[in-house]
Amino acid sequence: MRTGAAAGHVGYFHEAILYDSDDHLLAVVLPFLLGGVEAGEPTVVGLGGRGAEVVRRALPTGAEVTFLSGADVYSRPTAAIRAYREMLTGHVAAGATQIRIVGELPPVVFGATWDWWARYESAINHAYDDFPLWSMCAYDRRVTPPHVLTDVTRTHPRIARPDGSHEPTGVYTDPASYLAECRPAPLDPLQHTAPVVELVDPTPARAREAVRAADAGLLPPDGVDDLVMAVSEVVCNALRHGTPPVRMRLWCASDRIVVAVHDRGPGPKDPYAGLLPAGDGTEGGLGLWISHQSCDHVTHHRDADGFTIRLTAGNAHVPV
C-alpha cells in the first residue's frame, strides 16, 4: 500500500524540487525520506556530492537510506534509465509497494548536453510508470539556468514545496508530445568549420573506416570502438529507414570527435527512440538505443530539410 502524497496513485509519481537554500532542500527532502523509512519503503538518495552530504548530516543516525553516487548514476540518460529500472525491478520483486528516490543531475549537464537530459526527464514519466515509484528531482535555482528550469516545469507533473504541498506545475507536457516537438539542437563549435570527412550514402563499413581513420589516437580505444559502433548503427538506420541522400560529416578536435548523419526523411516515429529499446531493432529502435549508450552526447534535430542525428565522443560539455 502506497503512503504519503502518492497514496492511491498508480504508477510513477514524479515531482521536482526547485530549491534556493540548504534549508529549503532539507525541508522537502527530510520528511520525504523519513516517511519512507517509517513506512518500510526502499528509500534512496542520488544527490551530488555536496547535496548528499547536507542530507546525510541531517538524517538521524542509523536511518535506513541508501546513498547512490549521482555522478555514476547520471553518466548518460540511457544508463540512468537502465540502472534505475533494474533497481526498481529488484525492489518490486522483493515485495516493495512503493519506492522513494530523490535525485539531482550534476550542474555540468545544464550546458551543451542539456537537450538529451531534458528528453530523459520527459521520457521517464513513461519509462518508470510501471513501477510504484515516488521520486523528487532536485534543482538548485542558484546554479540552474532559466531555460533548464522551463524544461523542468514542463517535464515534471508537480513541484514539492517546503510547506508540504505538492502543486501541479500547470505546464506539464505529456512525454509523447514533448519529445515530438521540433527544438533545434545547438551546434557544436566544430560544426562552424569544414568537416574533415564528408560522405554521401556511405555503406556502414565505409562509415566505420572513416571514423577509425580520422581518430588517429584522439580517443581511448574503448571510446573509438563505441563511436565506430554508434556511427555504423546510425548510418545503417538512415540508409534503411530514411530518405536519400544520406550525408555523413565528421569533425575532430583534440578532445572530441563529432559525427552528424543527415537524411531527408522525418526521423524515427517513436518519441522515445534512443532512450528506450524498441522492438527487435527492425525499425531502428535498438540501433539508436545502442548509440545513446555508446556516445557522450547524442542530439536529434528535425527541420524542413530532414532529420539529423549528431554523435559526440569525448568532451561533450564544450560551450556552444
Image (cartoon, grey):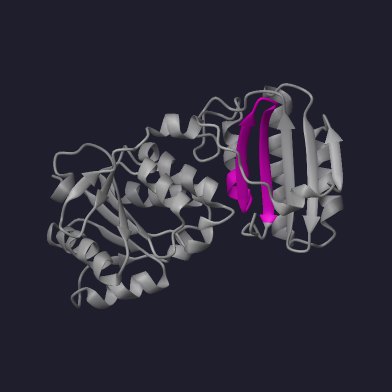
**In front: 298, or 132?**
298
> Total number of numbered labels?
0
Q: Position of residue 287 (x, y in %)?
A: 62, 36
Residue at horizontal 44%, vertical 47%? 81
Q: Tell me which segment is drawn in magenta.
A: 291-313
Residue 259, quarter of the rendered image: top right
Q: Position of residue 282 (x, y in %)?
A: 61, 25
Residue 180 falls left or right of residue 188: left
Q: Nearer the viewer, residue 73 or 161?
A: 161
Q: What is the magenta segment's predominant secondary structure?
A: strand
- Report the quarter where the N terminus lies: top left
Residue positioned most to the front: 146
- For the C terminus, the quadrant is bottom right
Q: Position of residue 172 (x, y in %)?
A: 34, 38
- The reply to whether residue 287 is visible in this rendering is no
**x 19%, y 39%: residue:** 9
- From the viewer's perspective, is residue 1 above or below residue 56? above
Q: On the image, which quarter does residue 252 sit in?
A: bottom right
Q: Where is residue 138 shown, x and y percent of the image?
A: 34, 58
Q: Is residue 304 above or below residue 48?
A: above
Please say whether residue 101 is one of the residues in the magenta stretch: no
Left or right relative to 192: residue 96: left
Query: Image point 63% across, 46% down: which residue?
Result: 186
Is residue 170 visible in the rendered image? The answer is yes
Q: In the drawing, does residue 63 fall left or right of residue 18?
A: left
Is residue 303 magenta-colored?
yes
In the rendered view, tell whether residue 67 sits above or below residue 270.
below
Q: Quadrant of residue 157?
A: top left
